[in-house]
Each structure stands twice: as C-alpha cells, then as structure tokens.
Image: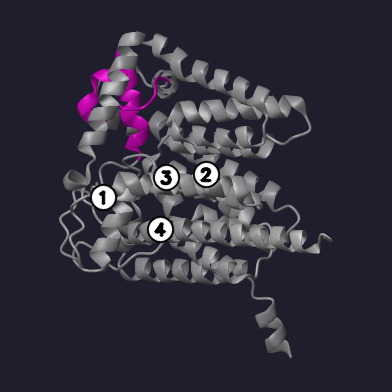
Amino acid sequence: MDTKLSLKEFDSQKLFFLLFFSALANTVLFALASSSESLLGLFYTDRQDSFMDLFNPIEFARGADPYENVEMGAIYPALCYVIYRALSLCFPPEIAANGAKAMRATPQGTVMTVVFSQLFIIALILFCLYMLRAKSKFYILAVTISILFAAPIIFQWERANILGLSLVLLIAFVLGMHSENKIIREISYICLALSASLKIYPAIFGVILLLEKRWKDTIRTAIYGIVAFFLPFWFFDGIESLRSFISNLTSGTDTTNYDKTGIGARIDLSTNISVLKWLFGKDGSMVSPKQTALLIVICIVMIAGCILLKERWKKLLCLTVILIAVPSFSFEYCACFYIIPFVFFMQESRKGIVDYLYAFAFFMMFAPVTFMNGYLTDVWVIPPYIGFTLSVVFINLGHVLIMLLTALSLIIEIISRFRNSTAKKASIPT
C-alpha cells in the first residue's frame, strides 16, 4: 500500500528533483575526485577571464565612445555603458588606466563582484519565496537550490554579465504586470523597458500586453522602452554612437558564426542543430540554409502557443523559446531566462505524461553535469574555439525538447478545442 501511495504521489516536480540532485551529487563527486578540475566544465574556457563580462565593459565605458572597442566585443546597448561608466568611478584613475584585469584585481573589484553576485542571488531567492509561498519550506529550499546551482546560473556567476540585471528586471515585470496596485503595474512596465534596453530580446514579453488587449499599457511600455534604449546614446556621441552600435552588433554577429567559434558555450538555434548533427554522426560545422525558414516556423508556433495555451507558465515558456532562438548567437547564460517559466511550472503538482517530459526538459536545461576532465573535446574530435562541455550539450538538447513539447502542447490544445466545439454543436437541439 505504501509503495503504491508513494508512486501515486511521484509527480513531475519530484522527477525533476530526483534527476537534478542526482546530477548535482555526481558533479560533486567528480569535483572531489579531480581536485575540482571537472568544475571547469561549468565555466568559461579561459581561466584568466573570470568576471570579465563585468570589467571589460567598464574599461570600454571609461573612454569617450565605448563602441570604439569593436574588436573586444563592445556590442551592448548604450544604457549598459552608462551603468558601466558609473561603476568605473569606483576605481582610481591610475589603476583603471592599466585595464580591465587591473581593476578586477583591486579590493574595489572584488567587492563589486561579490555585491553583483549577492544581489543576483537575493533576487532569485525572493522570486522563489514569493512564487512558492504556498509550498512547504523544504520544497521552496529544493527549488531554490535547483536554481542557484543550475548550469546556466553558475556560468552567469562566473561571467558576471549584465544579463543578470536584465533577468531580474524581467522577473519584476512578470510579477507586477497583473498587480491591482497601479503604481506596481507601472513600475513593472518600466522594468520591462529597462530589461529590453539592456538585452533587447526581452522585449518579446511585451506580447503579453498585446494579447491581453491592454493597448494603453502597451503604448506606455513602448514609450518607456524607446526612451530607455535611445536616450543613453546621447550620453556619448548621440547618432554616431547609435550607428557604431549597429555596426558593432553586425560585426559581433559575424565573429560569432559557428565556423569561427565552434559549438563552444552557445545554445542558439544554429548550435541546437549542430549538436543534433554531431550526435547522429553528421557534419555539424555547416549551418543549414533552411535554418531561417525553420526559425520562422518556430516563432509562428510559439506565438500561436502564447495565444492558445491556457496555462501561464506555458505562455511564458513560448516567449522564452523565442528569446533564446531568435538571436544569431546566444551563450549558455541566456538559458537563465528559463528560470521564469520553470518557477511557474513548479507552483503546482503535475502528473500528465507531457508534464513529466517537461520536467525532464527543465532538468536538461539546468543540470550542472560534467565529466572528469571538464570538456568533451577529448571525447569528440571537435575543434571549437571555446571549450565544448557536457552541460552545453544538455542545454542544447533540452532547448530542442522544450520546443518540441510546446509544439505538442499546442497540437493537444487545438484538438481539445476542436472536440469541445464539436460536442457543443452536437448538443444543440435541431
């Protein structure tokens, strides 16, 4: 009887916990056995480059025009560099003049990195506490640990990318957009505008306002976004900086093509396809000419899913898929955005077959898995520019599985609506 009861209570959330914590335990054992060498499989390849997504832009922002540093990857929107310009004031000029790594090596650099990480962690913990407040303390703790030790989050910690701030602002929008308090709602719209002004693609979440026919809210949010995105360029060289940004962004896209970087730490659509090709023994080094058509189909399916699917977490999942798939290059930390639909998914017990598959897909997205040597380069003969890791393989496959599952959910929803419509017509007396 007890066995039957426990099996009956084994929902998709428990499946996720079982898989995730098994992977985490395995990673800890590998770390102990390899003197932590295996943990390099969760970080960026260059061991001398930790936290440099924070300090490199600070160095760029110290100049008159940050977009002069095109070769170093100055491709962020101007709002980012306004923030980095402010942070650069924390360093004495004689130290800052020696470059980004000199700033990182100072006590100010250490404190800045710690504060950046702590604020990010606190925001994620508060998100879990608020969303799962009806759950037990043990359950909340398990979900929180799953997020804090998820592979994309660990990668984000090591890079200290401004994506963390963009994610927190997007979470604030998702939580506040339906508030009964007008001030909180308005702040949430500003948060979405700022999130999009930092990383551009979170703007896709504005679709929610459109689908809910909140036209005035949509217009105000768009105005906030236009101001937050364009106005900071005048902090530098105005139109010239805007032109440089567009030019640098195009250049950055060119220098991150698959044939120049390999699979590396990427999880975009090109890399999803490449990983699948490698797994089936085919040449994954060439991007398919049909990829653009596939991306269009994916976007259409996801928008349809956002419109037709009833559960909020699935709507958020569809938008997150677009956020990751549309950019020509998305690195591992971009998977952090999946935390939003994941926490909504974990709010309720789900026992459908598709729900168990979703739980497995989220496990693939977040699992902090490694090998003893950290990299797969020694296992597969792949010459990537950036080290190829098991966690990146898992995230790419998890992303593919999520796209397939959302498409399946859409098909099931359409069939269900058709049957209900047919049943209603049949029940009408002639």
Query: Which amino acid does the dot numbered 3 rest on?
Result: Ile
Q: Amino acid at mark 1?
A: Thr
Circle on res. 324: 3
The structure residue drawn at horizontal position 61% and vertical position 21%, both measured from the top left corner, is 219
* 3D distance between C-alphas at marks 3 and 4: 11 Å
Q: CA distance from mark 2 to mark 4?
A: 17 Å
| Residue holding disc 4 | 400
Q: Secondary structure at mark 1?
A: loop
Residue 125 x, y percent position in the rendering: 61, 47
Residue 266 lies in the magenta stretch:
no
Mark 1 → mark 2, Cα distance in angstroms: 36 Å
Mark 2 or 3 closer to N-term?
2
> Magenta part of the protein: which range?
51-78
* Helix, strand or loop for disc 3: helix
Q: Amino acid at mark 2?
A: Ile
Can residue 375 be seen by looking at this rendering?
no
Magenta segment, prevailing SS (helix, strand or loop):
helix
* Residue carrying label 2: 303
Q: Pointer 1: what residue?
A: 45
